[in-house]
Image (tube, helix red, strand yellow):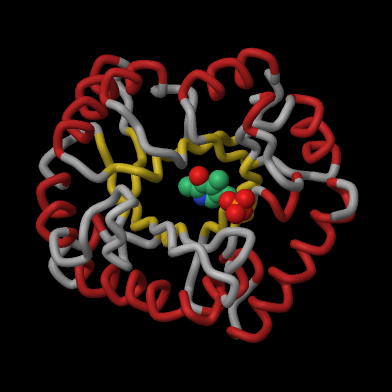
Amino acid sequence: MGSIRENLLLVEKNIDAACARAGRPREDVTLIAVSKTKPVSDLREAMACGCTVFGENKVQELRDKTAEITEPLHWHMIGHLQANKVKYLPGMVDLIHSVDNEKLAQEIEKQAAKHDLVMDVLCEVNMAHEDTKFGLTPEDTPAFVKKLQELPHLRVRGLMTIAPYTEDAETNRPYFRGLKELMVQINRDLPEDRQMSVLSMGMTGDYEVAIEEGATLVRVGTGIFGERNYQIS
Ligand SMILES: *Cc1c(COP(=O)(O)O)cnc(C)c1O
């Protein structure tokens, strides 16, 4: 691995190339720098290279980092979320990627209403039906999305998936393609002003394939910041 600057240049180059291969404009894809477990100094280095969107997977870490870094940035909650932590998120994050149960959705609705705002969310889908992962099954997702439409302070912008860990990104292509197809299918039953357009899919090992299959948000951690050291986190 190189420096954060070198890593970012490489990731940017790969995103450009994947967009070109797919015939997609570069502006269609937003890079989320996944900074979990990394020190604020690393985030500042990424900011100096132009990163403005950061992804974290723990509410406490989000609170600590947003308290320390007060520059205007976009923060995304990408990790599994417990309902009792939702109260900290209104006004702090632009998007919650990991909504996968009704209790959580109801709590987001409640807290957003309290702050008189509408919170953007994605539904997390477990495309590969992995026992170890959170998320709805693809089969349960359409009914869940329709249910969330009833909550006035919550807006479902799209779908998110964490594909299986693999050495060969190609093996995840069907899951990315499937997530896009699922979004298109669900959109058919949604009114014009409720159409979903966001696909959060692709991590360090497979973001290029995900872009080829329609990702609009890619979540890259290791590829930018290097390996995570959980002991010091
Ligand atoms: C950690 C994490 C990532 C980034 O993973 P890398 O393989 O380091 O790029 C992406 N998405 C989620 C939900 C994560 O928790």
Identify the residue shown where x is 56% and y is 22%.
61
Identify the residue shown where x is 54% and y is 17%.
63
- In front of the other: 36 or 123: 36
Relative horizontal placement of residue 99, taking residue 103 as reference (left or right): right
Relative horizontal placement of residue 71, taking residue 77 as reference (left or right): right
- Quarter of the figure that contains the N terminus: bottom right
- Quarter of the figure that contains the C terminus: top right
Identify the residue shown where x is 38% and y is 62%.
197
* Residue furthest front as drawn: 231
Relative horizontal placement of residue 87, taking residue 190 as reference (left or right): right
Give the quarter of the image for residue 120: top left
Q: Position of residue 2 (x, y in %)?
A: 89, 53
- In front of the other: 87 or 114: 87
50 versus 28 height, above or below: above
Relative horizontal placement of residue 66, taking residue 222 as reference (left or right): left
Q: How many marks?
A: 0
Q: Position of residue 144 (x, y in %)?
A: 14, 52
Identify the residue shown where x is 59% and y is 72%.
167
Q: Position of residue 152 (x, y in %)?
A: 18, 35
149 versus 45 height, above or below: below
- In front of the other: 12 or 140: 140
220 versus 182 height, above or below: above
Q: Position of residue 154 (x, y in %)?
A: 26, 37
